[in-house]
Amino acid sequence: MFDILPHLVRDELLDMVRSFFCEHGHELADCAGRLGGAAAEARVIEGGLRLETADRLDGRFRRDLVALHDLLSLQSVGDPDLIETELFSGFDPASREVERICLLSDGLAQLLRDIGEPIDDWRLSDVDDVAADILV
């Protein structure tokens, strides 16, 4: 009687994340591994695999994206108890690797803004503080 096919709802936000991972997934995993070790690299790979079968962008994946951004934006570098500090200390600040990490961090920050996920980017607050000092 009602032979209407169910309407397929596409999650536009999920599509945006899939597109970002399709374009940058290998680099994200590599940089995560360089900054956070094998466990961080594995989390990125696992997230990419979850994207293949996901039907919506859930809270867990959003938290994982924010955590990845925190790693790439060096939020934890400076804490002597964390692997990020030790691994980052071996980087040459002028290297292409650091530039690649910065570009990925910026791209991921834009993706997070596009999907409506608030981020705490400590780099931006420093810029705002300096700008406020200059204007006063």
Image (cartoon, grey):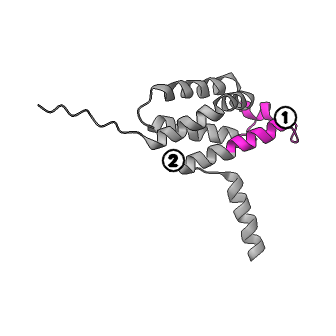
Q: For this view, does 45 lie left or right of residue 7?
A: right
Residue 51: x, y in percent? Answer: 50, 29
Residue position for label 2: 115
- Does the segment drawn in magenta span residue 96? yes
Circle 1: is it few (<14), some (14-19), or many (20+) Cα within 10 Å? some
Q: Secondary structure at mark 2?
A: loop
Residue 7: x, y in percent? Answer: 29, 37
Q: For this view, does 35 lie left or right of residue 114?
A: right
Q: For this view, does 27 lie left or right of residue 15?
A: right
How far apart, in angstroms, are the residues tagged by discs 1 and 2? Answer: 31 Å
The span picked out in magenta is: 76-105
Residue kind at label 1, given as amino acid type: Phe
Can you say which quadrant of the picture contains the N terminus? top left
Is residue 48 among the parts visible in the rendering?
yes
Residue 11, by quadrant, is top left
- Figure check: 123 above or below 72: below
